[in-house]
Image (cartoon, rainbow, N blue to C red):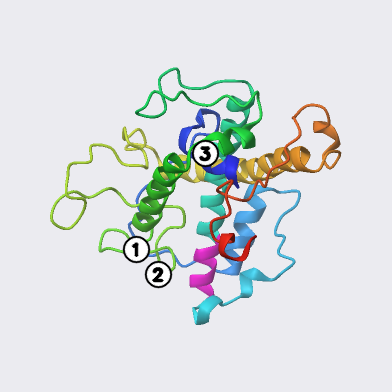
Amino acid sequence: MKSAIIAALIGSAAAFAPAQTGRAATAVSETKADLEVLAKKLNPVLGFYDPLNLAEAEFWGESNEATIGFLRHAEIKHGRIAMFAFVGYIAHANGFKFPWAMQMDGTPFPDANGNPPALWDSVSDDAKWQIFSLIGFLEFWSELSTPNHKHYMRGGKPGDYPDFVSGSEGIPHPVPFNLYDPFRFSKNMSEEKKESRLRAEINNGRAAQLGILGFLSAQCAEGSVPLLTGVVPHYDGEPMAPFVTNYLGQPWNM
């Protein structure tokens, strides 16, 4: 979604601090039984809820443990992006923006009168491609499997992001900070605290996914979210399209 993409890059998520999950030292192979135990810890009232039986699936011919690793990683990652998007949406809806120029020609950051999706529409395509390029690199790096970082479908810890490595076997220039815990605040954190913060991150991520989709639904289909009627402005665009111009559909007049 468009507001999620831009908010994920420039929004602040201080209110939803990521869990300090630590580096994976041993192989992690979760089963349906592990998910049932985790579900009770996350929400004792709802417990384990899997109407599509995804916890028993085997995607792409992989094992059930690998599939669970994929699903767990996907949920954590989507939750993190949604937390950025939710906080970023609120910031943009209230007119917060950087005071300096957004582009080299002096173009300022847009203000779309408190309408975050319309704000994204006003960002130039060149700027959007820069954002997508950064996202592409982060996605590429997150999929790396090295001796020090197992892939989440091969016994690695779901949600764990690998450190940035410099040198001949990594990025060809110094990278002083990692995406995960850049200031090493979790260095001396106990395993119990890490587990607790990871559960909080998952719950906050689930709430944020509902929140950002609620905002967009209320903007595009007035009345679909009664509590937001009259609170958020109407949006006539396409919230799922990254560009205003449909480049892929142009050859077919779409």
Residue beneath label 1, please? 150
> Label 3 sits on what residue type?
Ile
Identify the element where label 1 is drawn. Answer: loop
Q: Nearer the viewer, residue 105 or 177?
A: 105
In the rendered image, residue 85, in percent from the top left (x then y), is placed at: 57, 38
Contact (CB < 8 A) between labels 2 and 1? yes
Numbered mark located on residue 154 in the image: 2
> Label 1 sits on what residue type?
Lys
Question: What residue appears at the point 50 percent right and 72 percent down from the top-left corner?
Answer: 65
**Residue 144 within the magenta-colored segment of the rendering:** no
Mark 3 or mark 1: which comes first in sequence? 3
Q: Residues within 10 Å of mark 2 (few under 14, many from 20)?
A: some
Residue 205 vs residue 106: left or right? right
In the rendered image, residue 77, in percent from the top left (x then y), is placed at: 51, 51
In the rendered image, residue 29, in percent from the top left (x then y), is placed at: 46, 67
**Quarter where residue 208 is shown:** top right
Q: Which is closer to the viewer, label 3 or label 2?
A: 3
In the rendered image, residue 125, in percent from the top left (x then y), is placed at: 47, 43
Q: Is residue 164 above or below residue 97?
A: below
Q: Which is closer to the viewer, label 3 or label 1?
A: 3
Identify the element where label 2 is drawn. Answer: loop
**Quarter where residue 71 is shown:** bottom right
Which range of residues does the magenta coloring cover? 64-71
Q: Nearer the viewer, residue 171 or 232?
A: 232
Instruction: Give the alpha-carbon distance from disc 3 to disc 2, as whole Å.
Output: 31 Å
